[in-house]
Image (cartoon, rainbow, N blue to C red):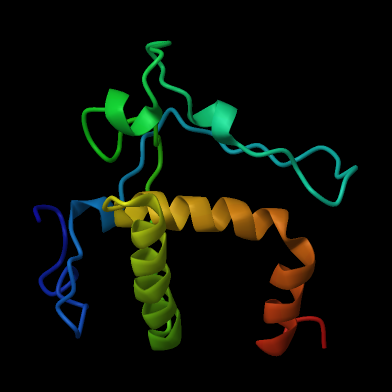
């Protein structure tokens, strides 16, 4: 992987199927804006935001040419081993339910969306980690 320091991409001690979908990339034309208000406990799903830029009728996973299409910014996760274990099990469960393989980046983004919708559960985990004390 060009552009990384030696060893930067070798930090997976289990040698799992990490790939380019976990690389960090940024585009300079992306700006982040803070949310202006929080009115409901459950925000609307972002699925409309993930629609294909071409306006195609195909679902997003079929209309994109790579895992990064439609994702202006990809971030690298540094996760605890227990989180990695949970991710692997959840991925397996989801793939069994859907009857097809799911890209890790898609699983992670969907999990983030669901997590952000479950503010009480998210807050509970953060409190377990020591936040809010």
Q: Is 104 placed left or right of 118 in the picture?
A: left
Residue 112 position in % (x across, y down): 55, 56
In front of the other: 73 or 50: 50
Location of residue 95 (image quadrant)? bottom left
Q: Is 41 placed left or right of 6 in the picture?
A: right
Residue at left offset 19%, top offset 52%: 20
In front of the other: 57 or 84: 57
Q: Is residue 124 above or below residue 128?
A: above
Can you name the residue that lies furthest to the right here?
39
Residue 38 position in % (x across, y down): 86, 45
Residue 40 position in % (x across, y down): 88, 45
Please identify the quadrant where the N terminus is shown: bottom left
Location of residue 68 (image quadrant)? top left
Residue at left offset 10%, top offset 71%: 6
Residue at left offset 19%, top offset 84%: 14
Residue at left offset 76%, top offset 43%: 43
Q: Is residue 58 visible?
A: yes
Q: Is residue 101 above or below residue 45?
A: below
Q: Is 79 placed left or right of 62 in the picture?
A: right
Q: Is residue 77 above or below residue 89?
A: above
Total tally of numbered discs in the picture: 0
Residue 102 position in % (x across, y down): 31, 52
Location of residue 17 (image quadrant)? bottom left
Q: Is residue 130 visible?
A: no
Please identify the quadrant where the C terminus is shown: bottom right
Q: Is residue 72 above or below residue 124?
A: above
Can you name the residue that lies furthest to the top here?
55
């Amino acid at each position: 992987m060009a552009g990384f320091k030696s060893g930067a991409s070798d930090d997976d001690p289990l040698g799992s199927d990490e790939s380019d979908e976990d690389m960090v990339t940024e585009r300079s034309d992306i700006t982040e804006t803070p949310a202006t208000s929080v009115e409901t406990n459950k925000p609307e799903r972002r699925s409309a935001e993930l629609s294909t830029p071409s306006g195609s009728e195909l679902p997003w996973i079929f209309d994109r040419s790579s895992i990064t299409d439609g994702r202006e910014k990809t971030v690298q996760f540094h996760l605890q081993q227990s989180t990695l274990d949970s991710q692997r099990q959840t991925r397996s469960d989801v793939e069994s339910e859907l009857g097809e393989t799911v890209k890790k980046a898609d699983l992670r983004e969907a999990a983030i969306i669901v997590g952000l919708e479950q503010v009480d559960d998210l807050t509970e985990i953060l409190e377990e980690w020591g936040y809010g004390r």
